[in-house]
Amino acid sequence: MALALSESGFSSGNNANFTTVDHSEISGGYMAMTVVGDYNTHNYSNHFMNSYIHGGAYYGVYFLYQDSGLFQNCEITCNNGYPVMAQYVNNSDFLNSEIHGGYYAFYSYYLKECNIINNQIYNSYYAGIYSYYSTTINFFHNSVYSDYTNNPNAFYLYQGCLLYTSDAADE
């Protein structure tokens, strides 16, 4: 599935706004699902709910230049790569989902004002969650498991991040 300017899924554009995908199965390809906006004008309000996204050779979901997006109650799997690759994403929510991956299960680069809440995140290599130059992220009530023995990071936070966390025991 590609939401971009051209059918290749590797270009960008501002023509995939207000798209809703609900109760669907998306499978196969180099990227099982590609949602690409434009650097200057992000795509807006693309929502994916109650769906099973799997079988991408290297990416489950490639989510680039997006604003006000939503992934809710999804199962996203990519055993040989990145189940979720979110870059330059603003004001978006990743909620109540299961994410299974090979490298970084949830890779975020320049996220701004996003919610990552109540997810089950598993990976077998590197880190469960990798956050790079992201700001104002609400990271609440997630379970993250990483079983890579040489670098067992469940969560890796890189430079420039402002992250909010919540411990369920304190509430």
Image: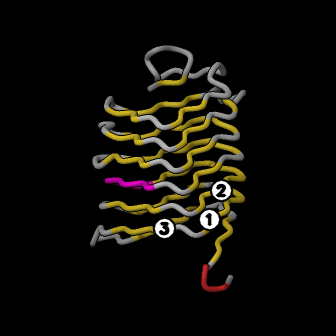
Q: Amino acid at mark 2?
A: Asn
Residue that carries the numbered disc 3 in the rendered image: 155
For disc 1, the neighbor class at 10 Å (few under 14, some 14 to 19, many from 20) is some
Percent position (x, y) of residue 42?
Answer: 68, 31
Look at the picture and state if 127 lies above or below 95.
below
| Residue interval drawn in magenta | 98-105
Percent position (x, y) of residue 149?
Answer: 27, 72
Foreground of the two, 105 or 97 = 97
Residue located at (44% from left, 35% from top):
24
Percent position (x, y) of residue 170?
Answer: 66, 85
Foreground of the two, 59 or 28 = 28
Which quadrant of the figure has residue 37?
A: top right
First in sequence, mark 1 or 2: give its number.
Answer: 2
Q: Is residue 99 magenta?
A: yes
Q: Amino acid at mark 1?
A: Phe
Give the mark toward the camera: 1 or 3. 1
Q: Real-space Cα distance between discs 1 and 3?
A: 11 Å
Foreground of the two, 63 or 70 = 70
Look at the picture and state if 39 lies above or below 119.
above
First in sequence, mark 3 or 2: give its number.
Answer: 2
Q: Secondary structure at mark 1?
A: strand
First in sequence, mark 1 or 3: give its number.
Answer: 1
Which label is found at residue 115?
Answer: 2
Which label is found at residue 139?
Answer: 1
Q: Secondary structure at mark 3?
A: strand
Q: If the image is split into quadrants, where does the C terminus sit?
A: bottom right
Percent position (x, y) of residue 25?
Answer: 39, 35
The answer to whether mark 3 and mark 2 are in CB contact below 8 A is no
